[in-house]
Amino acid sequence: MKRFPFPIFVVVFLAFTICVQAAEKTTAKLTVLNSMERINQDQEPFGETQVQIKAARNEVESFQVIVSATNENIKVIKAEVSDLSGKDGIISKNNITLFREEYVRVRKSSSRAELPPGLYPDPLVPFINPLTGQPIEPRGQFREKWGDPTITKGFEMYAVPFDVWKGQNQPIWVDVSIPQNTPAGVYTGKLTVTLKNNTTAFVPVTVTVWDFALPDGPTHRNHFGSVQNVGRIFGVDQKSDKYRDIAMRYCQLMADHRINPPLPRDLLPETNSDGSLKITPERHQALKKFIEEFHVTDFEIPRAPVKDATTTNRDKSARYYKDYHQYLKENGWDKRSYIYMHDEPNIKENYEEVLAHGELVHQASPEMRCLVVEQTYQQDPSWPDIDPAVDIWCPLFAFIDRDSINAKLAHGDEVWSYTALSQRAPRYHPHYEEVKNCDPPYWHIEQPLTAYRVPTWINWQYKITGLLYWSTVTTVIDPWHNPAFSHFGVHWNGEGYMIYPGAPSGIDGPISCMRLKNIRDGMEDYEYFVLLEKLAGREAVTKIVSTVAPEWWTAVKDPKIFNATRDLIAKEILKLKK
C-alpha cells in the first residue's frame, strides 16, 4: 500500500477540519429595523441587535429583522417567533404574523422622487397562506416518469425557503397584534431563523404593552377608493360569487389597516322607479353585518342613480336623497355618511354642477353631508362660490392653506386632505410665492416610508379630520415587477396601488405592503392624539405633534423622532388617566 508522507497527511487533515468547522459556524447575521426603515439588497447591514417595541391594546405594531449573509451564501428554511411571556400572561405567537419582503423594481423615477430608481422592498409575502392556514409551497416542475406531461406545483411568490447571497440582505416583516384583553406589562420572547445546515440565529424580542386601548375602527375619517378593479385583476366576473369573495377579502385587508372599506353595492338599498328606496331585510342585515364586522366608521353613499338629476328628474332625485337619509338615520348611520359629490371640479361648468347638486341634496335632506374634492379657496374669482353646496372640503396636500381652512371650519364645514401624483401648489394658492417650490409628502415607492405615516400628524396640526386616496388597486404596468401608474409617458411608482394581487402566491385575495402598514400606523397614531386630547385638551396634543409636523412642508423624516414622540404621548396618557 502506498503511504502518504506524514506532513502531507497532517496538512490535509487540518484543512479538512478547518473546512468542517467553518461550515459549522456558517450562520446569518440578524439586525433589527423599525417599520419606517428600509434596507437595500446589497447594503451594508445596519440596525439594532434586539427588538424593542411598544403598543397599546388593540393595536398592531411592526418590526423588521434583516437576514444578512456576511461570509458566504446561505439558505433560510424556517423563521418563527415564540410566544411572548409576561408577568401576568402571554401574547400568543398566533397573534404574530411573519412576511418575507419582496423587492420590486422602480425602473423609471416618479416625478419629484426623493430616492433613485432601483429595487425597493414593498410587497409582503405571508409565511402562511391566510386562506388555507398552510405555508405557501415554492413553485416546482416535474414528471412522474419520462415522457409524461410536466406537472407544475407551488407558486412563484413564497416566503420560505429563501437564499441570501454573500453580501446581500433579505428582510422579514413582523406584525404583532395586541389582543384587547392583554394585561399591561413587558413581554419577552425571540425570533429564530434556521438555516439549511441546521444552524440557527435569533434576536430577543421585547414588547411593552401600555395600559390603554385603541378603538376597533378608525377615528380619523378616510376614503381609499373602491375595490371594483379586482374583477379585472383576477379575471373574474363582477357578478360572480368568486368576485364577491375576493372583493370581501380586499375589504377585510383594508379594515385590518384602519381603512374604511367601501360598502359593497349589492348590499345597499335598491332604488324604485320613482327614486324611493326599496329596503329588503336580507340586504339590510348583510349591510349591517358588514359595517359592524369591519368596524366601518364612515362611508360614501351613492349619488342618485338618475339621469338629469338636477333638472328634469329633480323630484325623483330629491326623493332618493330624502329616503336615503331617513334610512341612515333610522340605523344610526347618518353621522357617518356623506355623498362624494364631485371630484376636482376644475372648470366653471363643474362649479355650477356642484352648486346645483348641493342645492338639490340640501333641500331634500338638510343634514346630509356633501364632500367635494376641492381646495378651500376659489380657483377663479369669476366662478360661482360653491361654499353653500359643500360640507366636506378635500384639498390636495400641496393645495393646503391654513387661513382658508380655518374660515371653513369656523362656519361648521369639515376639511379632509388627499394626495395624487406629485402636484405642487397651484398658481391660485393664496400664498403661492411662499409655497410654490415646496413639496408635501408624496405617496410613491421611492419616497421615505415616513411620507405614509406623517399625513395624520399634519392633518391634526391643521384640524383636518379625514384622509382620502383615490385608489389602492388601480391599473399599473405590472403589479409585481413594475408597479407604476403610467400616464402620458410619466411614471408614478406605486401611485394608486398599495394592495398587490395574491395570485402569484396562490391566494385569491390581496397581499399588503410596507407602505400600507405605515398608513395603518399613522391611523393608530391619530388614536393616541384623540386619547390624549380627552385628558389634556387639544392644545397640549398640538404642542407635541408640532415637533414632528409643524406644517405641510416641514415634517420630519427621521423614524426615531416619530417613535420617541409617540412614546411621549403614550406616557402622557398613562400619567393623566390614573
Image (spheres, helix red, strand yellow):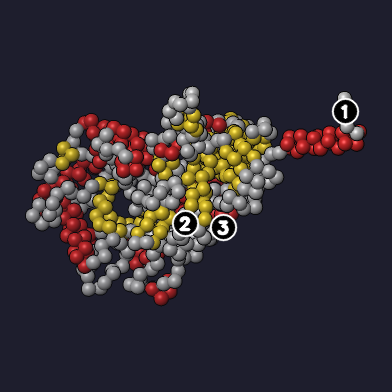
Residues tagged 3 and 1 counted as in contact (Cβ below 8 A): no
Residue at far right of view: 6
Q: Is residue 47 above or below residue 59?
A: below
What secondary structure is marked by label 3? loop
Residue shown at the point (21%, 60%) measured from the top left: 354
Between discs 2 and 3, the one toward the N terminus: 2
Q: Position of residue 295 (x, y in %)?
A: 37, 39
Foreground label between 3 and 1? 1
Judging by the rendered image, the residue that carries numbered circle 2 is 107
Foreground label between 1 and 2? 1
Q: Position of residue 461 (x, y in %)?
A: 44, 60
Determine which of the numbered discs, if any, sits on residue 48 in the image.
none
What secondary structure is marked by label 1? loop
The answer to whether any part of residue 21 appears in the image is no
Q: CA distance from mark 2 to mark 3?
A: 26 Å
Q: CA distance from mark 3 to mark 1?
A: 70 Å
Q: Position of residue 508 (x, y in %)?
A: 38, 35
Q: CA distance from mark 1 to mark 2?
A: 63 Å
| Quadrant of res 198 | top right
Residue shown at the point (52%, 52%) measured from the top left: 119
Determine which of the numbered discs, if any, sits on residue 2 in the image.
1
Disc 3 crowd, CA 10 A, few/some/many (<14, 14-19, 20+): some
Judging by the rendered image, the residue that carries numbered circle 3 is 558
Between discs 1 and 2, the one toward the N terminus: 1
Circle 1: residue type: Lys
Circle 2: residue type: Arg
